[in-house]
Image (cartoon, rainbow, N blue to C red):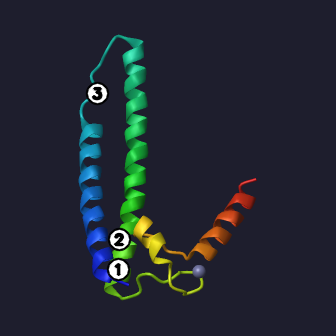
Amino acid sequence: MDLNHFETRVHEELTRTLANLHDTKTLLSQPVVKSSDCCDNADQVQQQYQLNTIITRLNARLKALNIAKVKLINEEYGYCQECGDDIEPARLVFDVTSTHCITCQTKKEMSQHLYAH
Ligand SMILES: [Zn+2]
């Protein structure tokens, strides 16, 4: 497996995610314009809520990318956290932060699905 390729991709996405996070936080910290119009205020609350959701998602992504980065450094990248088998390269190409092989991921999702009901 070409680890250099994944290292580059993890690095690129990390840079992009950090920039996004910075931009989103800047948007969120902009002073809220007071308006007498009730609908405008509702829109602002809605927008702040959406920005907070984006920030939560970006932070989660950042965490996953940092884990991938550490694994690359420690040469543990590309192995399933559950069973230790190689993660299918196609899964890593699709998502560089994949931590489970397809078998374990499916099992995990199935149990999550069961617990969710
Ligand atoms: Zn596995």
Residue denoted by label 3:
32
Q: Secondary structure at mark 2?
A: helix
Instruction: Where is residue 72? Give x, y as percent.
Output: 34, 82
Residue 18: image quadrant is bottom left
Q: Position of residue 110 (x, y in %)?
A: 70, 64
Q: Residues within 10 Å of mark 1 (few under 14, many from 20)?
A: few
Please tell me which residue is depicted at 31% across the width and 15% down the height of the picture.
35
- Please state which amino acid type lies under the numbered disc 1: Val
The residue mark sitting in front, 1 or 3, is: 1
Quarter of the view holding residue 44: top left
Q: Position of residue 114 (x, y in %)?
A: 75, 60
Disc number for residue 66: 2
Cα distance, mark 2 to mark 3?
A: 33 Å
Q: Is mark 2 within 8 Å of ligand 1?
A: no
Tag 1's secondary structure? helix
The residue under the point 60% across, 70% down is 105
Sequence-wise, the earlier of marks 2 and 3 is 3
Measured along the vertical axis of the image, is residue 110 above or below residue 83? Answer: above
| Marking on residue 19 | none
Left or right of residue 111: residue 27: left
> What label sits on residue 70 in the rendered view?
1
Determine the residue positioned at 50% across, 79% down.
87
